[in-house]
Image (cartoon, rainbow, N blue to C red):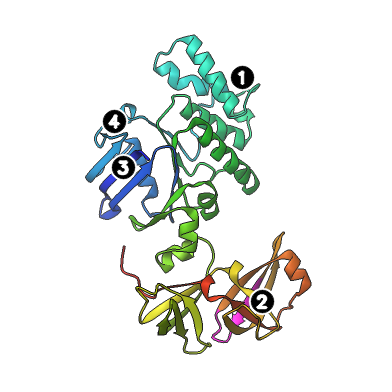
Amino acid sequence: MNESVVLDKIVKTHGLVKAVDHVSLSIRSGEFFSLLGPSGSGKTTILRLIAGLDHPDQGDIIIQQRVVTLDPPHKRPVNMVFQHYALFPHLSVFENVAFGLHMKKERQTNIQNAVSHMLALVRLQGKEKRLPSQLSGGEQQRVALARALVNRPVVLLLDEPLAALDQQLRQEMQGELKRLQREVEATFICVTHQQDEALMLSDRIAVMQGGKVLQVGTPQEIYDHPVSSIVAQFIGLSNTLSGTIASCEGGVCRVDHEVLSSVLVMCSPHDPPQGAVTVMVRPERVHVSSDMSINGYDNMLSAVVHHVAFSGNEVVYHVRLRDKAIWMARVPIAEAQASSFAIGQPVYVHWRAMEGLVLPAHPASC
């Protein structure tokens, strides 16, 4: 697949802070690529560097096989949608979307056709004459998308595009954004700190922290096989248990804990872990039972129910282990109704060796 955007060993400092620290990325043509990380991780700086709003101290930016490192924004085949949309409040929906085409001195007939097509694509037909103040938050966001896409950029840059929307509207717009990306066949690069948003929208995700890229992969790769406990904790919720490798045989390791029972976890038979490790188990993989032993499960820890929360289609149990750690179990509502547990009730948590992940306790700095 052709590469749409390549970042080659990019470094950018702000004063004494290295906002982007030797980052290299290859973003494929036509993919939805997300930069995910906490505030200050460098993701927005990367977006601004691609847009040409900032220039790197070191490294090169290549778009469609052309080095654009020092090119101004108007000479790059990109457009950007900002977090707060930046619509012109005195212009109508049609005029907002047509603004860039007017600046390019396009023929009026071409402008009319292009804007009408784009407004149909974002489902805003019949609202051409309204002002931004007369639109909902979701409609304003779609106007901003239409204004950016009407110029047919090769790459669309999205800076927290759904952050200003409430939760329900944000979920609705996630589907709209993915649909739009497929229809226009452009490369979308999105900055977000919302894990669920990145998992739902992205073909691939780059997880960032401290100006570095910790891991790049598909949503499933990063969720199921994080390279470090930092990535694991940032992508979804995780239960963790610290221990020491006692033995590894046939791709299964036994991890000893100073208080809890030993647990079994799958590992690479060719490169088994050694020494101190962290075992990670996702809450949806944990089974809660009043039975000490259940066929098919390799691991069991005793616990006491600490808190119970109802969440629509599931019940979330918070249980306290013997070492005082709190673990979570997400139980489908049908299963929870069949065997519910009360606060303070002794229980056992079970999981399979293949459903855990073993990671170095102190991973090397990325």
Badge 1 crowding class, 10 Å Cα cut-off, few under 14, some 14 to 19, many 20 or more, is few
- Toward the right, the furthest residue is 338
Discs 1/4, front? 4
Please state if 141 lies on the left or on the right of 19 as rendered: right
Q: Quadrant of the N terminus?
A: top left
Circle 1 — which element?
A: loop
Return the residue at label 4. 72
Nearest to N terminus: mark 1 or mark 4: 4
Q: Amino acid at mark 1?
A: Lys
SS class, disc 3: strand
Q: Secondary structure at mark 2?
A: strand
Q: CA distance from mark 4 to mark 2?
A: 58 Å
Whole-Å distance between the Cαs marked 1 and 3? Answer: 40 Å
Amino acid type of the residue tagged 4 in the rendering? Pro
Residue projecting furthest to the left: 58
- Can the viewer see residue 57? no
Question: Residue 252: image x %, image y %?
Answer: 46, 78
Is residue 323 one of those drawn in magenta? yes
Cα–Cα gap, marks 3 and 2 = 47 Å
| Distance between the alpha carbons at the discs numbered 1 and 4 | 33 Å
Asked whether disc 3 touches disc 2, contact meaning CB atoms under 8 Å apart, the reply is no
For the question of whether residue 34 can be seen, the reply is yes
Q: Which mark is first along the chain, 3 or 4?
A: 3
- Dot 1 and dot 3 residues touching (CB under 8 Å): no
Q: What's the magenta region?
A: 317-325
- For disc 1, the marked residue is 129
Q: Which residue is mark 3?
A: 6
Label 2 belongs to which residue? 288
